[in-house]
Image: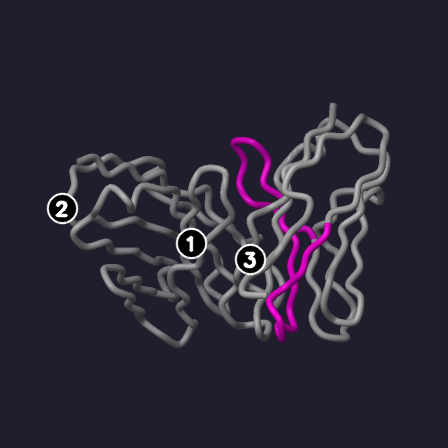
Amino acid sequence: KQEVTQIPAALSVPEGENLVLNCSFTDSAIYNLQWFRQDPGKGLTSLLLIQSSQREQTSGRLNASLDKSSGRSTLYIAASQPGDSATYLCAVRTSYGKLTFGQGTILTVHP
Amino acid sequence: GAGVSQSPSNKVTEKGKDVELRCDPISGHTALYWYRQSLGQGLEFLIYFQGNSAPDKSGLPSDRFSAERTGGSVSTLTIQRTQQEDSAVYLCASSLEAEDTIYFGEGSWLTVV
């Protein structure tokens, strides 16, 4: 059974810092991995999708890496801003339909 | 539409009543997913539709839960004889194909009293 763990559970940083969120998964037989953010009371917003054959993806200040063999992914956020405050979720797809989610990292960026 | 649309956004129902939750996926998306997020809990997979294939119902928690997708587009999640433990946010998502980026709606907040 696939299990996804995110570390840390919560993170508070001052504005401008670069930060790394970690995601690990137990079964390396994945199709892809996707990072989301969730604002309070809202749905999930897709940030980045990394296919199993890829090593990283970048979008603006975000960079996600994937090491499938070791079961790890990191989300790097450069020059953090208060607007980045949200819960960040990683999810792995081990079959066509099912995403297995981590519990999320609650990020607070204070001015 | 521009995104995944869900209705109602909020629903309060009495224990024992049936509820229907609706999802309009992004136009042209062949894959549709339902997830549930309970207070303080992670996201739980419920059901997945892909084109005309038989749906993957492996995540439905009991036979009180069912879902259908008509014409390969709109989907309805039905919960019969609701219980208090059914209170959660029900999130619908869609993707162009099975392995593509998944886009979520804003969710339907269900409270069973």
Q: Residue at x 16, y 41 (%)?
A: A15
Q: Is residue B69 left or right of residue A26?
A: right
**Residue underneath mark 1:** A36
- Amino acid under label 1? Phe
Q: Give the farthest residue toward the front.
A: B1
The quarter of the picture where the C terminus of chain B appears is: top right
Q: Residue at x 48, y 51 (%)?
A: A44
Q: Give the farthest residue toward the left.
A: A16
Query: Which of pointers 2 and 1 lies earlier in the amino acid sequence?
Result: 2
Which chain is indicated by disc 3?
A
Both marks 1 and 3 on one chain: yes
Using the image, determine if residue B52 lies above or below residue B15: below
Query: Which of pointers 3 and 2 lies earlier in the amino acid sequence?
Result: 2
Which chain is indicated by disc 1?
A
Q: Is residue B57 left or right of residue A5?
A: right
Mark carried by residue A16? 2
What is the magenta range? B22-46
Coordinates of residue B8 in the picture (x, y in percent): 68, 44
Query: Which of pointers 1 and 3 lies earlier in the amino acid sequence?
Result: 1
- Amino acid under label 3? Leu
Q: Residues within 10 Å of mark 3 (few under 14, many from 20)?
A: many
For the residues labelled 3 and 2, the Cα–Cα distance comes to 32 Å
